[in-house]
Amino acid sequence: MEPSDLKDELRREVRGAIGLMTGEAKGAASDQICGLLTASAWVREAGCLMVFEALGDEPDLTALASAALSGGKTVCYPRIDWERRVLSPIAVETHAYPRAAFRHGVQEPTEGREVAPEELDLVIVPGVAFDARGARLGRGGGYYDRFLGELLEKVEIRVGRRAHAVGVCFDCQRVERVVMEAHDVCVDAVVTEKGVFHGLE
């Protein structure tokens, strides 16, 4: 079976598992995830971080963003150039930032300062599935893989430090193995409602 077929099969399996979660369970899990992240050294030490606006099958990071903003941190949300397939971090002043849904129901900032990748200390990364290595299965567009490839490789050379990439998901999205291809990028760790799991077994 081709890697793309294996990935599609895993997406179907994981989405089936998420579909069994109630809204109440997702909310409780999201609160646990935000609490773990807020207490983590990654967030405490980050001056600038990027989170994401959750779709219905993703953890809601509102509490994390609000806590970071209250703590004086720069919080960014991704804006996507769908034609060029490029993701850009946009700084917001409040979680109630001006936004609009463009493609696929993804909420994006409609205004705000674009932040250079080298300003980011931490990127919170969504995913359909993660494994113990930190390997990530996305939705298939490659936006985060391209963005993280730039961030984790070129930024380190440019500014002499490495930003952290931390995946978040519900615990039912942790799987035994994610098929990796050349363009796929691992995260440093994965946070679910069950705890923090460091990448690279």
Image (cartoon, helix red, strand yellow):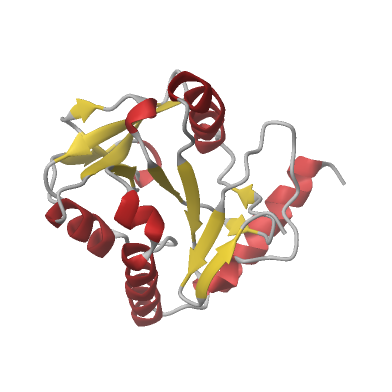
Q: Residue at x 49, y 36 (%)?
A: 162
Answer with left or right where residue 179 lies relative to residue 20.
right
Identify whether 172 is placed above or below 164: below
The answer to whether one can see residue 15 in this image is: no
Identify whether 50 is placed above or below 151: below
Q: Residue at x 32, y 47 (%)?
A: 46
The answer to whether one can see residue 194 in this image is: yes
Q: Residue at x 55, y 35 (%)?
A: 141
Identify whether 132 is placed above or below 80: below
Percent position of residue 30, x then y: 36, 70
Percent position of residue 198, x then y: 59, 61
Answer with left or right where residue 23 lies relative to residue 67.
right
Answer with left or right where residue 133 lies relative to residue 121.
right
The quarter of the picture where residue 131 lies is bottom right
Foreground pick, 18 / 49: 49
Percent position of residue 113, x then y: 19, 27
Answer with left or right where residue 69 lies relative to residue 90.
left
Percent position of residue 91, x then y: 21, 35
Q: Residue at x 51, y 28 (%)?
A: 156
The quarter of the picture where residue 103 lies is top left
Numbered circles on residues, count: 0
- Residue lying at the far front of the rendered structure: 160
In the picture, the quarter occupied by the C terminus is bottom right
Identify whether 134 is placed above or below 59: above
